[in-house]
C-alpha cells in the first residue's frame, strides 16, 4: 500500500462544514484500511479562524460515527503547497482561490473533491452552510472519500492540475 501521497489538505470557503467533514470522513476511511496519511483542512477565507465546525455539521457527522468536534478552522496559506502532497478543493471557486496563491514553479496537485466521485455528475460539493442539506453533503463526502482512498492506495492520483 505504498503511495507518494502522504499529506492531504481539504479546502472549502470557511472551514466549518465541507472541509472539516471531509477531513473527518477521510481520516476514518484511511484508518479502516491502515493507510497512514496526514490529513488536515482549511478555508480560503478567514471568517471562522479558530472556530469549531458548524454545529449542524457536527451533529450530522456524529450521527454517522464521525467526531469532528475537536477540529478548528484555519485559513489556507501559501505554505500549504509545501506542506501537502495533495490539496483538494470543495468547489471551483475554492480551486480558483487556491491556484491564485500557488507559488511559481510549485507542482503540488490540486483537485476538486468530487473528481473522486465521478458517478455523481457533480463538480462542486454543495455547501450545507447555505443549503442546510447536511445529509446530502455527507453522502457526497463519503463517496468522494472512498474514491480518493482508492486512488491513493492504487497510487494513481494525478500529480498536478494546472
Image (cartoon, rainbow, N blue to C red):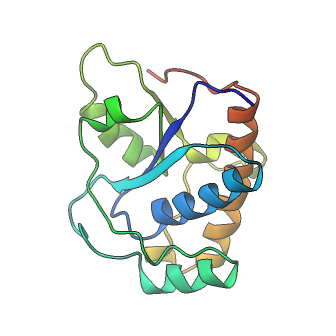
108 or 98: which is nearer to us?
A: 108
Q: Which residue lies furthest to the top in this view?
A: 105
14 up-or-down from 87: above or below: below
Counting from the top left corner in percent of width and height, residue 15 is at 37, 63
Does residue 50 appear left or right of residue 111 in this picture? Answer: left
Q: How many labels sit on residues?
A: 0
Query: What residue sits 38% from the left and 47% below the top?
Result: 93
26 sits to left or right of 128: right
Image quadrant holding the C terminus, namely top left
**Residue 130: which quarter of the image?**
bottom left
Q: Residue 118's spot in the image, x, y percent? A: 73, 42
**Residue 112: image location, x then y, percent:** 54, 41
Q: Where is residue 72 in the image (x, y as percent from the top left)?
A: 34, 69
Locate residue 99: give its quadrant: top left
Q: Which quadrant holds the N terminus?
A: top right
Query: Residue at image x 51%, y 79%?
Result: 57
**In-front residue for pair 131/81:** 81
Residue at the image point whose x is 55% and y is 59% from the top: 22
Image point (66%, 71%), residue name: 136
The quarter holding residue 80 reads top left
Amino acid at each position: 500500500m505504498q503511495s507518494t501521497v502522504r499529506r492531504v489538505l481539504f479546502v472549502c470557503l470557511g472551514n466549518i462544514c465541507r472541509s472539516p467533514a471531509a477531513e473527518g470522513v477521510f481520516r476514518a476511511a484511511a484508518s479502516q484500511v491502515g493507510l497512514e496519511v496526514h490529513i488536515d483542512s482549511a478555508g480560503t477565507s478567514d471568517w471562522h479562524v479558530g472556530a469549531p465546525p458548524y454545529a449542524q455539521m457536527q451533529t450530522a457527522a456524529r450521527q454517522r460515527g464521525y467526531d469532528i468536534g475537536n477540529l478548528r478552522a484555519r485559513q489556507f496559506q501559501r505554505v500549504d503547497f509545501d506542506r501537502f502532497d495533495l490539496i483538494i478543493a470543495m468547489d471551483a471557486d475554492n480551486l480558483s482561490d487556491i491556484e491564485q496563491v500557488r507559488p511559481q514553479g510549485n507542482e503540488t496537485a490540486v483537485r476538486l473533491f468530487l473528481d473522486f466521485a465521478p458517478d455523481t455528475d457533480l463538480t462542486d460539493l454543495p455547501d450545507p452552510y447555505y443549503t442546510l442539506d447536511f445529509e446530502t453533503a455527507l453522502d457526497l463526502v463519503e463517496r468522494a472519500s472512498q474514491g480518493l482512498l482508492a486512488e491513493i492506495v492504487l497510487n494513481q492520483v494525478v500529480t498536478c492540475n494546472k
